[in-house]
């Protein structure tokens, strides 16, 4: 282990520097040394990889098999499958690395009905077995104020949750929250534990619980 004074200050950290530090085995001065089995360093890192310009990459499924993306217009989802048999990864070019490592499984447009619902790209929850994912779309009301008062119900918006089959893109069920306010950023408003889903409403100040019954 190298001396702890080689660790970079947190205010100067970037994703690139963190990856390099991890590959070199550097650690924070206040952090105890970890076993090598719990800290696996990547053997290959590609920088500035060209990704699809018309989509926003959201996150991987827990098993690492699928990658979720939302189109730039926030109307459809794309699911990519990771090609785990990629050969000669060290020779991949930045321009072609994404297409060589991932293949498009499907693109699915989410139904929006009579209202102009848009998918929230900062919200996504996968089930523990990676078989389903919970997405949400949002309909902004005309009278929404950016500096909204939580106590004013007329400043709330409409939300529609989708339970989606990861492999097929089929919608298993939907939940609708009208005239409400939910904190969607980084899934703050929702929690999934096994088959129990809890959603926190800031607009109405209550917690709603659901039990997921997923058919195998």
Image: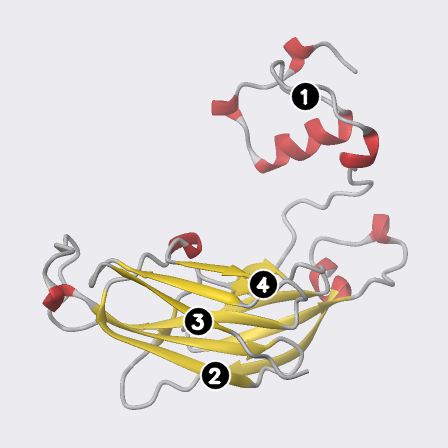
Q: Residues within 10 Å of mark 2 (few under 14, many from 20)?
A: few
The quadrant the N terminus occupies is: top right
Q: In the image, is 163 to the left or to the right of 214?
A: left
Say which element carries label 3: strand
Q: Are marks 4 and 1 in contact (CB under 8 Å)?
A: no
- Which residue lies at the image location 66% right of the left edge and 59% below the top edge? 62
Q: Nearer the viewer, residue 53 or 135?
A: 135
Residue 175, percent across and down? 38, 78
For label 3, the crowd category at 10 Å Cα-Cα, with few meaning under 14, some 14 to 19 and many 20 or more, is few
**Residue 85 in picture, x, y percent from top left:** 87, 63
Rendered image: mark on residue 27: 1
Left/right placement of residue 142 relative to residue 53 reads left
Which one is closest to the eye, mark 2 or mark 3? 3
Question: Which residue occupies the foreground of this view, 72 or 110?
Answer: 110
- Vertical comparison of 41 with 57: above or below: above
The picture quadrant where one finds residue 199 is bottom left
Disc 3 target residue: 210
Q: Based on the displayed image, in which of its 4 quarters is residue 201 positioned?
A: bottom left
Which numbered disc flags the more N-terminal residue, 4 or 2? 2
Q: Are marks 4 and 3 in contact (CB under 8 Å)?
A: no
Considering only order in the chain, which callout, 1 or 3, is on the residue closer to the N terminus?
1
Residue, x 71% and y 60% (percent of image)?
63
Which residue is labeled 4 in the image? 194
Nearer the observer, 75 or 182 = 182
Q: Is residue 102 left or right of residue 155?
A: right
Eye-nearest disc, 4 or 2: 4
- Secondary element under disc 2, as helix, strand or loop, is strand
Image depth: mark 4 or mark 1 in front: 4
Measure how far apart labels 3 and 1 are at the Cα level. Answer: 41 Å
Seen in the picture, residue 164 relative to 34 is either above or below; the reply is below
């Amino acid at each position: 282990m190298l001396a702890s004074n080689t660790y970079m200050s947190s205010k100067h950290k970037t994703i690139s520097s963190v990856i390099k530090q991890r590959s070199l085995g550097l650690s924070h001065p206040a952090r105890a040394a970890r076993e090598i089995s719990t800290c696996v360093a990547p053997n290959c890192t590609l920088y500035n990889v060209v990704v699809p310009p018309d989509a926003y990459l959201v996150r991987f499924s827990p098993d690492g098999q699928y990658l979720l993306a939302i189109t730039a217009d926030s109307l459809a989802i794309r699911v990519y499958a990771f090609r785990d048999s990629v050969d000669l990864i060290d020779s991949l070019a930045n321009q072609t690395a994404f297409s060589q490592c991932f293949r498009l499984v499907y693109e699915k447009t989410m139904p929006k009905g009579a209202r102009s619902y848009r998918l929230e790209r900062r919200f996504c929850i996968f089930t523990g077995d990676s078989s389903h994912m919970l997405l949400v779309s949002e309909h902004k009301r005309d009278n929404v104020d950016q500096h909204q008062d939580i106590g004013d119900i007329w400043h709330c918006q409409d939300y529609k949750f989708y339970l989606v089959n990861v492999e097929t893109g089929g919608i298993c069920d939907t939940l609708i929250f009208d005239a409400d306010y939910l904190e969607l950023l980084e899934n703050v408003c929702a929690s999934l534990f096994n088959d129990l889903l809890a959603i926190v409403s800031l607009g109405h100040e209550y917690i709603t619980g659901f039990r997921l019954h997923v058919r195998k």
